[in-house]
Amino acid sequence: MKNRTTATLATIALAGMVGLVGCSSGTAETLDNGDQKDVTIAVFQGWDEGVAASYLWKAVLEEKGYDVELEDADVAPVYEGLSSGDYDLVLDTWLPQTHKTYMDRYGKDVTDLGAWNDDAKLTIAVNEDAPIDSLDELAANADLFDNRLIGIEPGAGLTEATQEKVIPGYGLEDMEYLTSSTAAMLSELKSRTDAGENVVVTLWTPHWAYDAFPLKDLADPKGTLGDAESIHSVSSKQFGDKFPTLEGWIKNFTMDSDQLYSLENAMFNENSSDDYEPIVAKWIEDNRDYVDSLTK
């Protein structure tokens, strides 16, 4: 009995040692600056300013030795993923209005690292030569736009604001509100403006579409889309512990609209390729002083 007990204890001890070795081998790899090496950045599908900022930071961090994974996702799953720690960071939270619903729900479980651009605004845009200039003219002239308002992703804050405030606020219930994707909206915008036809879309600034297409924003006298907003970086609660150096860089990150337009135009307008990494690499070399300042 004594020998069996000793053998059993030895087996348990050996198993425990194997378990410890397994835990040790699973420890996250750490860089010299104290940050974990692997970073996961969530990217809202179709939100070009967030795509641009995310690819920029991916390139910047990879120069510093990080392994960066960009994961496309709809808005709601991103905040849920941040709150659970499945995502480390998202660079495209619009506050105080557009993503208020998500921050109200998940705010206690995520960290707002601050704003990097203060010129964001939700808009309803039409072709530049459209015969109306204000949202309060749209209902009476809906037939000039084929009774269609072209939207973006169903889960977007802009979609929520349009459904809950713009449409009832201006009596647009008889218009067909089409929501699909930002890509589909931009395709419709391009085809209609190329053909010289009227079109009305949900949009936002900063966005490269204002440089690419002849557009004007409809006035919003009732303020249904709110005032100018700021674009914030939001992280998981564990972010500061996992990435103490990167957290400081992100907190200090700023990018004005001219810089953002320049990057967006290079990625989405001047090039037809969706292989963004070489495009971003060239932009970085053309803007090296600014890029180097991001990690000082």
Image: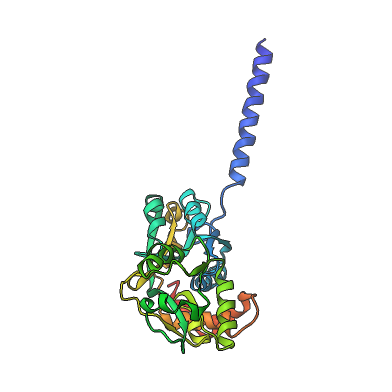
Visible residue check, residue 106 = yes
Q: Reply above or below: 7 against 289.
A: above
User: At which x and y percent is residue 264?
Assistant: 52, 79
Q: Nearer the viewer, residue 115 or 158?
A: 158
User: At which x and y percent is residue 179?
Assistant: 53, 66
Residue that appears at 68% across and 20% down:
7
Q: Reply above or below: 162 against 241.
A: below
User: At which x and y percent is residue 34?
Assistant: 48, 58
Counting every numbered tag in the picture gives 0
Residue sitting at the far top = 1
In the image, 10: left or right of 290? right
User: At which x and y percent is residue 170?
Assistant: 37, 70
User: In which quadrant is the C terminus drawn?
Assistant: bottom left
Visible residue check, residue 208 = no
Q: Nearer the viewer, residue 82 or 156?
A: 156
Residue 30 placement: quadrant: bottom right
User: In which quadrant is the N terminus drawn?
Assistant: top right
Q: Nearer the viewer, residue 205 or 222?
A: 222
Q: Nearer the viewer, residue 285 or 17?
A: 285
Q: How is the image coloured?
A: rainbow
